[in-house]
Image (cartoon, grey):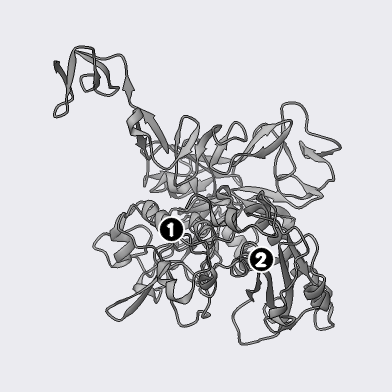
Amino acid sequence: MEKSNYEQRILQTDTEPKPIRITTDYSMLTNKDVTLQQRNYLVKLVEISKLYFQKLLKVYQLKQNNVLPQTYKGLCDDHKVQPNDYSIGIPNSDLHIYTLYQYVKNDQQTAIANFCAFAQEGISRPIFGYIKYNLSKISGDEEYFQKNLKETFREMINILGVSKLGLYFWINPDTGKTIDKDNLTKIYKKKQIEKDTIEFITSKHLKEITRKYYNCPKAEGMKLQIDKYQRYFEFRWDLTILYNEFMNQNQVLTDNVFSIFTIAALKDTGFYAEVNENMAEKIFWGKGKGCDFLENTCQSTIQYDEYSYLVHQVQCSFDYERIGIPILQEINQCNIGLGLYKDKLCTNPNIVSDQDEREQEQDKLFNYSTQSKCFQSTATKSSSTKQYKDASRCHQFKCSSDASEITIIFPEIDLQVICGKGEQNTKKDIDSSGEKAKGQVTCPQDYERFCNYTPICSNFCSQKGVCVNGQCICQDGFGGVDCSIECSGVVDNNTCLEGQCPQGKFLNPDNTCKLDCPLGLFGKDRICKPCHRSCSKCKGPLANECTKCQFMTLLQESQCVDKCDQKRGYSPNYDLGVCEYTLTYTCEGNCKICSNINRNLCITCKEGFQLNDNNNQCLNG
């Protein structure tokens, strides 16, 4: 198609993509069944979620009010909406969400959400939805805020149309029209393998991402999780092939990441003009492991690090974030994840509340912080008189910029242990003198995976913002690396300033003045401004000003391309994500243009000579 379905179907919408405007109705939370603490807690969850998705998505904004279509008879699911919503509509809104509640004691779900109306003009996409919280699971306790926020994000994805129910409304890229039941097989497949039913999403971007991420060219698409406790419309990736992803509901509190897979699913809906790939966080589960991992998982003859083979031992998780005893997942009988028994999340400073347990942890030189991870370690204070059987600890760390060196930090005793190049899996004495500490610590097996996992934001952004790739995006009126500083201006060196950032610094998404900008932004006029959507890093706003590309593209002459122009002498270097120029005029023999790697291999010949295609040599004409 020469034009996208967006360009063909814009009727009552703007002509340029702009951030989606999400509006909310909290009126149901004023009922006496909801305490003030619960109401404020739920509003905070939804408002931070709105901030996240308004940064993630661009749409062709509605020019007029967002009106609930008459065909829905004044209902959003079973919620009766205000008459103004279906007569006058909601101003400055592209998606309107009703925040509802219920009390269901035996339901394990914290919330349930879905879309309830689609636009009937312009792009057919969700324009009304609801999220219904189960107040029997919501106390308003700040300790569970991050968990509840992740659950709210996940439910918002249902509203946005990434669900099994939503599949029936996705836009067919071939026709620009909604996929009907008869054409569902274009994006969704079921297979029966022995006694198991396997479900795949086979849409364009998801198929491409799956093939490249796993290094499996024959992958049909991305596999979905199926279990008996799952709601019929839920959309979850198979836990055995992508465990700690945003869309998955794990049995423990993991630092799930919003990955390129969910980004691809949002793209494949056809609802959104742009999905910001720079919001995708790094993930390593199964990456590059090939078709064997994708098809056989833990049943393979290869023992993959993703699965636990020492079932009854306390150990570090695959992402080094947690310590615990692996539990046997029902899916494919793979030992993945860490069970609740003795489970500890190293990045949670508040994970240990019992005073006796805290003193014991301090004796073992545990350190829980956003800069901590799990190590195989037998560390104890030199003064300790106790013998401990466990051999895993949470310790602070710092990685070198190229992930070739890891410093393990013991701030309690002012001591450091350095894991250098080539020292993977090496045991090191923590204190050879024995004056401050006893025991050993083992250097991680995989430095790259250890160092490059998505970092946790300081103080979890103080519940005043959202963490993306280790940096907070703060709500209006707040700033600082953890969004803790109330400030209507800008924050520089932890001080609130009126006006703009000082010369040489740029205003970042956390409302602080820094010397550079994060992924997807570049510095100009003392502000971090958006790169072109094709760029991951850039030096300007145009498509030909990229310095680094997104996951599926390669950098060639400052532009991001799907394929390198080999006719012009460019070859792909997938490890670096670039197209390398491989030709030169400085040649040997009778070559005019030759390979830069082997200058005897001719591409074109000097005048009077003819190219022999069999051996790339120039022979007498």
Does residue 550 appear to the left or right of 210 in the view shown? right
Toward which corner of the image does residue 515 lie, by quadrant?
top right
Amino acid at pointer 2: Glu
* Label 2: element kind: loop
Q: Could you say which is closer to the camera, residue 337 or residue 351?
A: 337
Q: Position of residue 116 (x, y in %)?
A: 65, 75
Q: Give the residue displayed 75% in from the left and 81% down from the top.
A: 74
Q: Position of residue 444 (x, y in %)?
A: 42, 48
* Label 1: element kind: helix
* Cα distance between the residues tagged 2 and 1: 25 Å
Discs 2/1, front: 2
Q: Give the residue displayed 35% in from the left and 65% down from the top.
A: 310
Question: Is residue 249 placed above or below 619 in the rendered structure?
Answer: below
Q: Could you say which is closer to the camera, residue 95 or residue 467?
A: 95
Determine if residue 223 is in view.
no
Toward which corner of the image does residue 141 lie, by quadrant?
bottom right
Question: Is residue 88 placed above or below 528 in the rendered structure?
Answer: below
Toward which corner of the image does residue 576 lie, by quadrant?
top left
Residue carrying label 2: 121
Does residue 297 appear to the left or right of 31 in the view shown? left
Q: Position of residue 267 (x, y in %)?
A: 53, 57
Which is more N-terminal, label 1 or label 2? 2
Q: Give the residue displayed 39% in from the left and 36% down from the top.
A: 421
Question: Is residue 316 placed above or below 148 in the rendered structure?
Answer: above
Residue carrying label 1: 204
